Each structure stands twice: as structure tokens, then as C-alpha cells.
Image: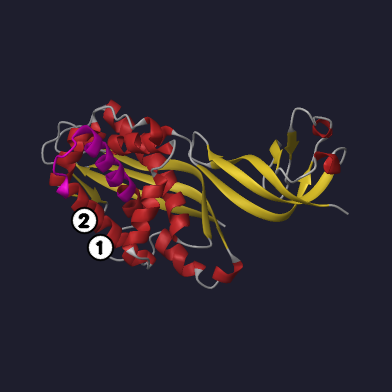
Amino acid sequence: MDITLRHGIEYGVDDAVSIEDLIKSLDANARILRRSAELLSTLIPGLTLEPKYVSVTSLTQESPLREVFALSAVLAYQKELEGEVPQLIESLTGVHVSDQYDTLITVIVMIIAIYGISKAFEVLFPGRDKQQLVDTEDSLIEQAASVLGVATYRIRDAVAILFTGKQRRALVSASQKVFAPTRNQYGANIRMRNGVTLVSKEAVTLAQSAAGMPFEPDEEADAPKTESEFHHRTKIILHAMDRDRKKVGWAGHIPSLFDGRIPMHLEKSQNPEAIFGKSEITGDILLTKEEDENGDMKPKEFLLVQTYLD
């Protein structure tokens, strides 16, 4: 089913915000909003939120500066969760959410932004006190945990995983840009649309110091993230151009798992002659996925562990 998640914040600033900083903020909030759907999918077992597009539904360049976004997403869920989904949708779309804040999605977006700016602060100002950022993150996580009914450590772990691999640099950069409208604004804060404070002026002051400086994570952080999955008795399609590539290598397509062909390797115990010339086989495989430039895990290659021949 299609749902719309709304995210809106107010920048408590006294002076006008430059067009450059405004554009940075809009782009950063949109990027993190997409990632918030991924985070929610991780926190709610059996539920999948696939973002379609982000739109700006309202923008008021006054004091305070107001930005309101809508994330169109496809919601899917496992059959056994059917009875619970209506309540989850209410939480996700901001219906009947606690009066402490307008919508869950905005809290999730700001958790990601605060986590990211904290990482930038640690790199740029090693050893400096960042307690206000820590307190803000704790408060936001507690609010989200209350609505979702999950332990706070699960949210912390899920956010930490979100900031791994190639997407770490992009997410930290986006987190910095969320605070762009507060540049040179003394005493600025960030609030919900109902006026409730999300990020205090003290925390914003720390964020400001790390928002406008280049952040360069270490090389290890840039290494692509990989993961492996074992699949039992899987149908593998060997294309015509692959069947005669015995000396070069193999490639296969597994319709149930991915589109297109990827490299196939044979475990040492497997005899190439047993599958040579076949167009389709059934086997146990170990599928390796690698993170792409958007932070999505894509099939890279697979190892044929066992073959089942007729």
C-alpha cells in the first residue's frame, strides 16, 4: 500500500537565511528523510518501507523558517503482521502520536541528523565536550522508542549500522547541512511545527561549529560493506554465453533473488563437468552482496556449494 509520511521542522532564527543555506537544508532533509524509512523498516520486524519520492509541501522563509516535506513510500508487511499494521500506520503517519511531538518521522530524521553531526564533531574537535549533542540524541531516541515500543539500544544500534560503509560520508555531510540555516544565527534552535524544541540552542551551537567544515572519514570507513546469505535448493539459470566459458569463469541468474547475471564461483568439491552445457541447475549457494553508492545492498557474486542433479 502507498502511504505518505510527513516531516516538518522550524528553524528558530532571527535573521533571514541565505538561498545557498536554504537549498542545502532542503536537500539534506530530503536525503535523511529517505534514510528514515530504511531505519523504520529495520526497527519494525516484518515491515518494509520503500521510498518513492520526497516533495516539499510548504516552505516559509520567515522567522521561524519552516520546512515541511512529504515522503511517498510503499509499505509492505508480512501476513502475520496484518492485525498490527493499522496501529503501526497510525504511528508512522503521525495519527494519535503522543503530544510530545507532531510526528514520529520528524524525530527519526533528527536522530539521524544529530548522530551524524556528532560524528563530524568528534573528528573535527577530538576530545572536546559534546554533552549537549549527547543529551539531545538521548532525548530523541527515548521519544522514538516510546512510540515504537522498542528498547532504546535497538534504535542506537540501527542508527550506527546506517552510518557504515559508503553511505557514511554522505549521511554525515547531509547531517551537517541540516544545520546550514543556523549559520551565523546566535541562539538558534530547531523545533517541531508545534513549537516543541527538538534541538536546543546549546546543542545547535555545538552543531554550528562542525556544520561548515569538511568532514573526511578514514579510508576504512569508505570500504564497501558486504554481507552473505545462504540459499538452499535455488534455481540457477546459466545463459548460453556462459555455458562455454569453462576456462574463463561462470555467471548465473537467480530469478527468485535478483535480476541480471552476476559471477558464479564453484566450491572446490564441485565438478565443473557436471554442469557444463546445462542451461538450468538447482543448487545451494552462498550469495555475496555489496553496498552501492546509494548505500543499498546489491548482489555481487555467488558461490555454488552443492549441486542437485536429476
Disc 1 crowd rating (10 Å Cα; few below 14, some 14-19, many 20+) is: few
Question: Mark 2 belongs to which amino acid?
Answer: Val
Which residue is rendered at x = 46% and y = 50% of the image?
A: 38
| In this view, 242 is above or below 40 | above
Q: What is the quadrant of residue 165 in the picture?
A: top left
Bounds of the magenta segment: 111-131
Q: Could you say which is closer to the camera, residue 181 or residue 223? A: 223
Q: Quadrant of the C terminus?
A: bottom right
For numbered disc 2, what is the local secondary structure? Answer: loop
Q: Earlier in the sequence, mark 1 or mark 2?
A: 1
Q: Could you say which is closer to the camera, residue 216 or residue 199? A: 216
* 36 relative position to 203: left or right: right
The tag on residue 100 is 1
* 259 relative position to 96: left or right: right
Residue position for label 2: 196
Residue extending farthest to the front is 269
Which residue is rendered at x = 80% and y = 31% of the image?
A: 246
Q: Quadrant of the N terminus?
A: bottom right
Which residue is rendered at x = 34% and y = 32% of the image?
A: 218
Disc 2 crowd rating (10 Å Cα; few below 14, some 14-19, many 20+) is: some
Which residue is rendered at x = 46% and y = 62% of the image?
A: 44
